[in-house]
Image (cartoon, rainbow, N blue to C red):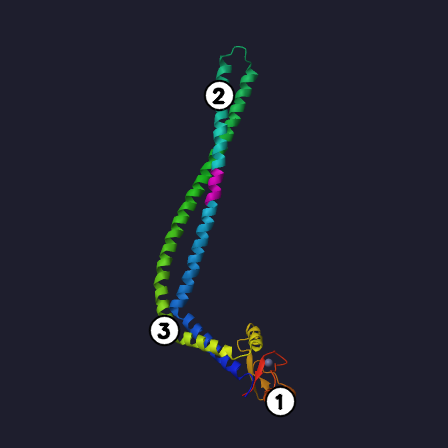
Amino acid sequence: MSRLNDLWEYQSRELQLLKLTKEMKSSPAYQKKTKLHKILTDHQNRIHEYEEELKSHTEQIAALETQLSQQLHEYELENSELETMQQDEEVTAEELTESRKSIEKLCGKINALNRDLTKLIAWCEEITQNITKTFSDAKRAKLDYDAVRTVCDAEKENFAPKINELKKELEERKASIPPELMKEYEALRKNYSMPVAKVASGQCTGCYMKLSSVVEKRVASGSAIVRCENCGRLLFME
Ligand SMILES: [Zn+2]
């Protein structure tokens, strides 16, 4: 008996488990659940982005409001100064013009700030509406997700006995395989679905390369663990 007999059996159970899991995940309900899960995650991410945007706009609004109140205060001061100047008989026409110009400039700044504020407030309203809509979409998707998850759970229940049985068997079989060999197998498993390949008609059935007669004889003798010289799979002969 080949030294890889236990590992070959282990691999076949592992493949059965993989096939069952794949079958379970290919049901329409499972596919729908995966799709809805993605939709829900997208909604959550979008809400987070909207909230971040809203936070940044709110901060900008607060900064603009501070600037606006400073400008308005300055405007009031300049205005009262102008009123005082208008009552002063010694004031020159140039001084009055200068004061009016300064007030006009302030008015320009105040108007620009008002425009920016209006724009930002409108953006915030739009973002808030988007958040509300995304929340409502997410709520609907969550209801669908919960319903489909119930179906998936029932389906899983059907697969569970066989899957658990295979998992238990795999654990038991693993115990009888030398840890070093298991390590090699698991390393190969990262690249190959079947790390143990049978030798048939002098070929490795993993990569279908012709094996040298020396290699073939070594596998047949069962005296050592032999790897395919081409693909590195562990070679097995019954
Ligand atoms: Zn090979």
Relative to residue 194, is residue 21 drawn left or right?
left
Tag nearer the camera, 1 or 2:
1
Q: CA distance from mark 1 to mark 3?
A: 46 Å
| Magenta-drawn stretch contains 66 | no
- The magenta segment is 54-61
Q: Amino acid at mark 2?
A: Asn
Ligand 1's image quarter is: bottom right
Foreground residue, 37 or 94?
Answer: 37
Q: Residue 217's mark?
A: 1
Comes first in the chain, label 1 or label 3: 3
Residue underneath mark 2: 79
Q: Amino acid at mark 3?
A: Asn
Residue 70 rendering spot, x and y as whole percentages: 50, 28
Which quadrant of the figure contains the N terminus? bottom right
Identify the image quadrant of the C terminus.
bottom right
- Say which residue appears at 62% left-offset and 87% top-offset: 218
Q: Which residue is mark 3?
A: 158
- Residue 14 placement (x, y as % from top left): 48, 77
